[in-house]
């Protein structure tokens, strides 16, 4: 990849969703009435989406031979679509390679 720059189109997504919520302690039944599920917000790079789930990655490591072959993701998690309240998507064009790295280092 020396001297070459590659471009990708990815999306950053903000997922608003409802999750189970664990409550602990000992209380009378009527004291538990106000407890329930939790509303969450998760943000990441979209890696996969289908009718059942949306999958996000916290980190993307660009293709960097010889140490990283192909793009690699870290901290990947999937959210069931049945729990999703709303999804916001933002374009995230990615440019990488030696030429892009040199431009970044000159800033």
Image (cartoon, grey):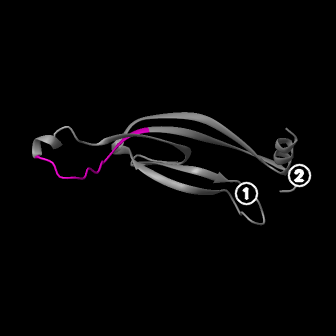
Left or right: 8 as drawn, with respect to 57: right
Task: Name the element at disc 2.
Answer: loop
Q: Position of residue 47 (x, y in %)?
A: 55, 50
In the image shown, does 30 or 44 lie closer to the viewer? 30
Residue at left 15%, top 48%? 27
Image quarter hosting the N terminus: bottom right
Q: Of the numbered discs in the image, which one, if any, rests on residue 3?
A: 2
Q: Position of residue 14 (x, y in %)?
A: 50, 37
Image quarter hosting the C terminus: top right
Q: In which image quadrant can residue 18 be found?
A: top left
Please tell me whether residue 60 belongs to the stretch shown in magenta. Answer: no
In the image shown, does 55 or 104 lie closer to the viewer? 104
Q: Residues within 10 Å of mark 2 (few under 14, many from 20)?
A: few
Residue located beneath label 1 in the image: 63
Specify the segment rendered in magenta: 16-28
Residue at left 45%, top 52%? 78
Residue at left 76%, top 59%? 64
Q: Position of residue 62 (x, y in %)?
A: 71, 54
In the image, farthest residue toward the left: 29
């Amino acid at each position: 990849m020396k001297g070459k720059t590659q471009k990708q189109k990815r999306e950053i997504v903000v997922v608003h969703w409802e999750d189970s919520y664990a409550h602990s302690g000992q209380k009378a039944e009527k004291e538990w009435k106000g407890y329930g599920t939790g509303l969450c917000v998760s943000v990441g790079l979209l890696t996969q989406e289908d009718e059942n789930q949306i999958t996000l990655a916290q980190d993307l490591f660009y293709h960097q031979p010889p140490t990283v072959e192909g793009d690699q993701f870290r901290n990947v998690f999937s959210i069931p679509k049945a729990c999703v309240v709303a999804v916001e998507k933002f374009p995230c064009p990615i440019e990488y390679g030696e030429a892009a790295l040199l431009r970044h280092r000159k800033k």
